Amino acid sequence: MAEISWRHDVDAALADAKSASRELLLDFTAAPM
Amino acid sequence: MYPDPRVVRFVTDSFIPIRIHVREQAADWKRLGERYGVQWTPTVLVVDSSGEERHRVEGFLPADDFLAQIELGRGKVAFTAGQFDEAERRYRAIVDRYPKTEAAPEALYWAGVSRYKHSNDAAALADTARRFGERYQDSSWAKKSSVWAA
């Protein structure tokens, strides 16, 4: 089954979103990783 | 909600997805939790490219409701950016694809506002009020749109 490729490098992802004008989905979770 | 393949596809296609775990990423959790005022898990934020929160989902939702909520967030991103035609498209997609969700009447309302902002034609608002006469009559969004009735 396909899964979401979550990023965990938060600051780099924020920078990428800004440079690419993309929206972010931030998931604050306590689920097992 | 995440095991649903529709959620996987939509999140992957539409967002840069970031996961912040309360224990595994304690420092990020503290810093970003404070920045965005997160108090509970799961909390999912739709954030625009400049890092501003545009929509929030707190607690678990079934897949259709979750998809509708995060698309609502994308609508708000476009609306805030002044991209009213794109905002309308995103809001109407919620009404069309997830008509039974709680997000749908809110989306119908903002679709009408987006069309009005895009066209500057008050008929867009009157048409929205008419649509609320056909569905979601008991929603707060129907009450808010009632002032637009022709």
Image (tube, rainbow, N blue to C red):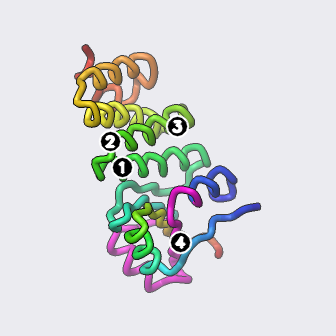
Segment tinted magenta in the rendering = B12-41
Near mark 1 (Cα within 10 A), the count class, few <14, some 14-19 or many ≥20, is: many
Q: CA distance from mark 4 to mark 2?
A: 29 Å
Q: Do marks 2 and 3 share a subunit?
A: yes
Residue ID for mark 4: B19
Residue ID for mark 3: B101
Q: Is residue B140 among what the camera can see?
A: no
Q: Do marks 4 and 2 share a subunit?
A: yes
Q: Is residue B20 magenta?
A: yes
> Which mark is in front, 2 or 3?
2
Q: CA distance from mark 1 to mark 4?
A: 23 Å
Residue found at the very far top of the displayed protein: B150
Locate residue B141, reporting x and y percent: 34, 31
Helix, strand or loop at mark 4 = strand
Of labels 3 and 1, earlier in sequence is 1
Residue ID for mark 1: B78
Between residues B118 and B16, which one lies in front from this camera angle?
A: B118
Q: Is residue A18 among what the camera can see?
A: yes
Of labels 1 and 4, earlier in sequence is 4
Helix, strand or loop at mark 3 = loop
Q: Amino acid at mark 2?
A: Phe
Q: Report whether B11 appears left or right of B142.
A: right
Q: CA distance from mark 3 to mark 1?
A: 21 Å
Q: Residue at x 59, y 60 (%)?
A: B12
Tell me the subunit letter for badge 1. B
